[in-house]
Image (cartoon, rainbow, N blue to C red):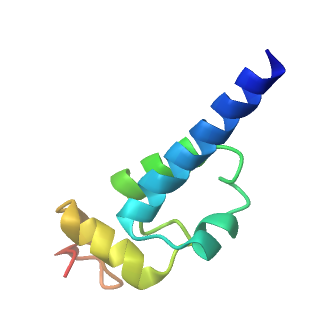
Amino acid sequence: MQDAEKLLKWWRINYCMRRLLLLGCTNDEIRSCPDYWYDLDSLYNALITNPLPVLCVAWETCLRIAEERCLTYIDKNGRDTKAP
């Protein structure tokens, strides 16, 4: 039973990490997110809904994710802007 729990835990972490890596995040970025490290699903959901407030991920990565998902954001002048 204990081996099955270890296997499922390993699989879950690798599954979640793989989804984040496919978004374009690096291992260092993922590991530097203290708010999300114990819940990688929350990090993934934050990145696909609105990646810009996630500070531990590089700005270029956040903009690329926003562009791929056709998200808009408000720029520093208060205008709605589509990700480049």
Q: Residue at x 57, y 48 (%)?
A: 14
User: Splitting the image into 4 quarters, where does residue 11 fall?
Assistant: top right
- Judge by depth and name the residue closer to the eye, 7 or 54: 7
Whole-percent x and y of residue 36?
65, 53
The relative height of residue 1 versus residue 44 in the rendered view (above or below) is above
The extreme right residue here reads 2
Q: Is residue 5 above or below residue 69?
A: above
Total marks shown come to: 0
Looking at the image, residue 37 sits to the left or right of residue 22; the answer is: right
Residue in the picture at 52% in, 73% down: 26
- On screen, 25 above or below 43? below
In-front residue for pair 69/15: 15
Q: Position of residue 83 (x, y in %)?
A: 22, 75
Q: Nearer the viewer, residue 14 or 48?
A: 14
Drawn side of residue 74 relative to residue 53, left or right: left
Is residue 75 visible from the viewing direction of this image? yes
**Residue at position x 17%, y 62% from top?**
70
Classify the position of the C terminus by image quarter. bottom left
Percent position of residue 16, x then y: 52, 46
Is any part of residue 46 visible from this angle?
no
Q: Quadrant of the N terminus?
A: top right
Q: Residue at x 39, y 70 (%)?
A: 24
Residue 32, how many percent across, how many down? 69, 70
Which one is nearer the viewer's eye here, 17 or 53?
Answer: 17
Which residue of the protein is positioned furthest toward the top in this rendering? 1
